[in-house]
Image (spheres, grey):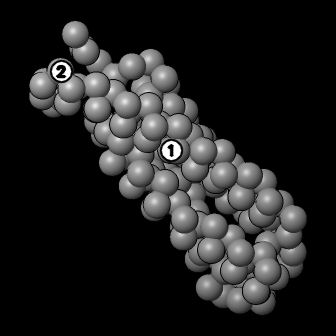
Amino acid sequence: MFKEYPRPARLTQLLLATGFLSFGAAWLASPDHLATLFSREQPAAVYPIVTLALSFLGIQALAFGIFALVLRFSSATFAAFGIAMLPLFLADYWLYQVTGAFNEMALVHIGGLSAMLAMCTHGFRVMREREQAIEELGLNPF
């Protein structure tokens, strides 16, 4: 009956992967340009740790994107992805509000994270409905 994920959940999974991979690729392709675009001042001049934090944004995004491509998503996977993104909101807050290292372009990153968090919520709901339907039929989902 259920051969593969329903289209909405699979599409949500692919959109998550695309978002993370494109963001990570942009940071790897042009880290200096993006650091200048996102930073109020030369980050290393104010806080040396900021340069390292900016570098890890791209690496983290690529890791998330690769996992989103290769994992078999369930409702728990969508929930885990959403929970794993929450510290990134704190990092953006710290870089924007506390250190003043990020300028208003950080809001673009926060917007992207918010969209991906909404996708995780949507994917969780869709997959939870699917898992409940499978349970009602007495089938093994995996």
Label ID, residue 78: none
User: Which amino acid lies under the numbered mark 1 shown in the image of this protein?
Assistant: Cys
5 versus 69 height, above or below: above
51 versus 81 height, above or below: below
Q: Position of residue 70 (x, y in %)?
A: 32, 37
> Does residue 33 show up?
no
- Residue furthest front in the image: 136
Label ID, residue 137: 2
Q: Position of residue 59 (x, y in %)?
A: 50, 59
Task: Assign a secondary structure to mark 2.
Answer: helix
> How much space separates mark 1 and mark 2, taking CA atoms?
26 Å
- At a point 28% along the width and 32% down the height, the residue shown is 131
- At a point 44% along the width and 31% down the height, the residue shown is 126
Instruction: Please give left or right for residue 58 compared with residue 126 in the image.
Output: right
Label ID, residue 120: 1
99 versus 103 height, above or below: below
Task: Assign a secondary structure to mark 1.
Answer: helix
User: Pointer 1 and pointer 2: residues touching (CB < 8 Å)?
Assistant: no
Q: Position of residue 26 (x, y in %)?
A: 65, 48
User: Which amino acid lies under the numbered mark 2 shown in the image of this protein?
Assistant: Leu
Circle 1: is it few (<14), some (14-19), or many (20+) Cα within 10 Å?
many
Assign the N terminus to one quadrant of the image. top left
- Looking at the rendered image, the disc whose residue lies closer to the viewer, 1 or 2, is 2
Instruction: Please give left or right for residue 95 compared with residue 81 in the image.
Output: right
- At a point 62% along the width and 74% down the height, the residue shown is 90
Which residue occupies the foreground of this view, 54 or 141?
141
Label 1 or label 2, whichever comes before in sequence order: 1
- At a point 58% along the width and 50% down the height, the residue shown is 117
Assign the C terminus to one quadrant of the image. top left
Classify residue 31 by image quadrant: bottom right
Circle 2: is it few (<14), some (14-19), or many (20+) Cα within 10 Å?
few
